[in-house]
Image (spheres, coloured by chain):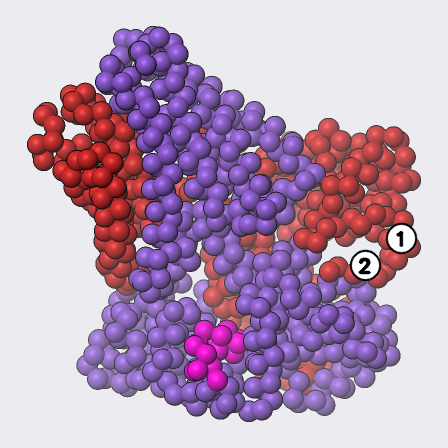
Chain colours: A purple, B red
Amino acid sequence: MTEMTDAPDAEDLAPPSLDDDNRLTDEFVRLVSEAVDDGDNNLAQELVNPLHNADIADLFELIDEDERAPLAGVLGDLVSADVLAEMNEHVREDLIEVLEPGQIADLTEQLETDDAVAIIEDLDEGEQQAVLAELEPEDRAAIESALTYAEESAGRIMQRDLVAVPEHMNVGQLIDYLREHGDLTTEFWEVYVVDPSHKPVGTCQLSWILRVPRDIAVADIMKREQTLIPVDMDQEEVALRFQKYNLISAAVVNEDGRLIGMITVDDILHIVEDEASEDVLLLSGAGEGDINEPIRDSYKARVRWLIANLATAMVASFVISIFGAAIEQMVALAVLMPIVASIGGNAGTQTMAVSVRALAMNELTRSNTRRIIVREFRIAILNGGTIAILIGIGTALVFANPILGGVIALAMLINIVVAGFAGIFVPVMLERLKQDPALASSVFVTMITDTMGFLAFLGLAVASGLVGF
Amino acid sequence: MTEMTDAPDAEDLAPPSLDDDNRLTDEFVRLVSEAVDDGDNNLAQELVNPLHNADIADLFELIDEDERAPLAGVLGDLVSADVLAEMNEHVREDLIEVLEPGQIADLTEQLETDDAVAIIEDLDEGEQQAVLAELEPEDRAAIESALTYAEESAGRIMQRDLVAVPEHMNVGQLIDYLREHGDLTTEFWEVYVVDPSHKPVGTCQLSWILRVPRDIAVADIMKREQTLIPVDMDQEEVALRFQKYNLISAAVVNEDGRLIGMITVDDILHIVEDEASEDVLLLSGAGEGDINEPIRDSYKARVRWLIANLATAMVASFVISIFGAAIEQMVALAVLMPIVASIGGNAGTQTMAVSVRALAMNELTRSNTRRIIVREFRIAILNGGTIAILIGIGTALVFANPILGGVIALAMLINIVVAGFAGIFVPVMLERLKQDPALASSVFVTMITDTMGFLAFLGLAVASGLVGF
């Protein structure tokens, strides 16, 4: 559990603010909210004071929208730059709207470049300029330069403050350098060793520096094999490098290979989470899927996919309409046909989710695509066989019609096998066409399984002579 | 890009092994595979030698299953303990099966406790005992003790090797201690300060130690506010703490509050990825969803959900069967009804994906559930209204039947609103019942939207007098 040993007095006053899952309790949130409503500013501050910055940010996310600005007014300096950096971007945007450019500038100056950029990039153009004008020239230059890189690129998430030393230094000189330069960052985990043209030649973990005598050359303990991040690399790609090579920090280089920044793993943790969440939400057609997103944006993101789904559902409907005469002869077909489509859709979604994740993790490449298709085919045969037997026997018994049982069993098997192929082909093809497989796979796969489900079932019913056409 | 400056000679021989996305190229994998087939062991070793451990692990994952053991034989010592630690667990299990307990013991002794445990916990009981018997007593004790903690708990993923120092040390003494004790771990990013009973009282980043003179007390630069991880905490919970508090490492304590291990962020990165992927795959009913999982296991995981889906689809079918007479009168109902169910299902999945992620990230709590339900209701009204207008007008025109258009529009609106409620109620209820919302939500939500889709559409068709009942 989080020990707040430096604030024992404040803790005595407050009710338990965190539950077993480390979330702010409903009771605590209500207490703060009531204190703000009652104008009891002292109580509100006393309650919030012992909280970690991340929990203060959570508090703003949890209380009602119209209470956020009053709460910020009451808390004053407790809403520090670090609290803003931890806050959900939509909630932060609401809060920042009520601040003056000068106030925003003061807050962002307390942050590292990457966190400051994260706040400023969300402002609209005019506000951005107003805030930038209020910044110290040095900070302004750093942030303006970060903003020249594409969103979600390494250039946006890197810090400019880092420790870079020449190769000829020894450990003693390095330690003296760190002690003497008070203006250096204190947030670093590795030291970069650079050549005279400022190109990285090696990386040195701080623990290695602390473990050897002063007279050892830095060049002798540094690791020469290092992962360099080009400044225009996409953040998702950066996150994959961190995961693959177990990095704590990595040097960012420009086109000339010169060291211009550093990315640390604590920022990557959020990116890994975001990118993985993005896949769940994209697959479901829920857009960004943030519960704090403005309703208007959520509506726009979601309705697009529902309209796309409407179009694909109409294709499936058209298939049914071809067999209208067959359904009039035997209404059981209308009763059973959604089962074939639904389970096929489900099987397709299973394979699709597996493929999309494997593609995102770089595990599914040209080398093993054929093998994975064979693997999915075999699973589809097993799944299709099992479900076909169950539904076939069930249908034959319930409708006292063995031919109908056979028709639905075969249609089920066909649709689950088709679903298996679609679930892997569609994402792989989209990836080869340089599209995001998570974004559009769902629509295509569902269209294929719905259409094939109705076509196979109704078509086989006609072909078997069960109904006329 | 990854620079392998320490192996320039080997690189000259090899074809480009990594593509732009840092994946092993198909060409390279084929070349290695052919060298192994041809018995050209030297070529295979030369090709693989310059690769990073993580890429050697990937190579085993990419080549065909029956080539993995021969490749391991050819590569010999290149398949180091670190390569095994990087490898997908299913692929590793296959390889380890051909090794003797003594060989496995030799390999695991080169690893940190957490990586060694990850390898040994996958072995079956008898093999585990055989490997443990071959280990040095000290390593055996560490691993046996780790295995006493629950799977996926902090005790399994922690390292025992860490640096803990007493409060009275100053920075100079700490540096001397680190220099003199060659047996200490070199993989640490923070030093833990403990009281005489070995309870953590503070944490000190290595950069802070390097920035101050030797005579400063460690107690003066350490951070007292620290996140302590109870040894039995679930790894998902641990990962949330790392994300929330931007941790690089954290102290693990036993029931008495004594420091017994440390967890570092590089291990957390994999857990964040795994847990987030787990949600995508659970939501889709694809089980573990690992492309290297044995087919038998994938079949078992997936067919369960298809059978559950069969049961829920039958409920929807039953609703249709009630309206058999109505469908016989107007076959257009059979043509249109899947649209209502399908789009409702899609809308439900959108809301469900958002709720499941928000629950997993501790963003949806008792404090804001009511507000989020209202939010989803408003989005559902907007989405439902839009789709209802489109499908209503389209149907009225195509079927030249305005009443049918009105019926399907109203049914669509009802189903999308119901989907919105179901998409949030079902996961929240499952969470309050201490179930994993990602695991079972899908089945319930789809059942609700399918059933409601058919019921609303066919029921309204009857109620409107469009067809008799």
Does residue B152 show up? no
In the figure, residue A250 lies in which quadrant? bottom right
Image quadrant containing the N terminus of chain B: bottom right
Tell me: A379 left or right of B169.
left
Q: Earlier in the sequence, mark 2 or mark 1?
A: 2
**What label does residue A87 carry, if any?**
none
* Residue at (22% x, 39% y) in the render: B397
Q: Chain of mark 2?
A: B
Residue numbers of the magenta segment: A115-129
Residue A7 in the magenta stretch? The answer is no
Q: Chain of mark 1?
A: B
**Secondary structure category for the residue under label 2:** loop
* Residue at (72% x, 36% y) in the render: B63
In the image, residue A264 above or below residue B350: below
Q: Which residue lies under the disc numbered 2?
A: B4
Crowding at mark 2 (Cα within 10 Å: few <14, some 14-19, many 20+): some
Q: Which residue lies under the disc numbered 1?
A: B12
User: In the rendered structure, are the residues bearing label 2 and label 1 in contact, judged by CB atoms less than 8 Å apart?
Assistant: no
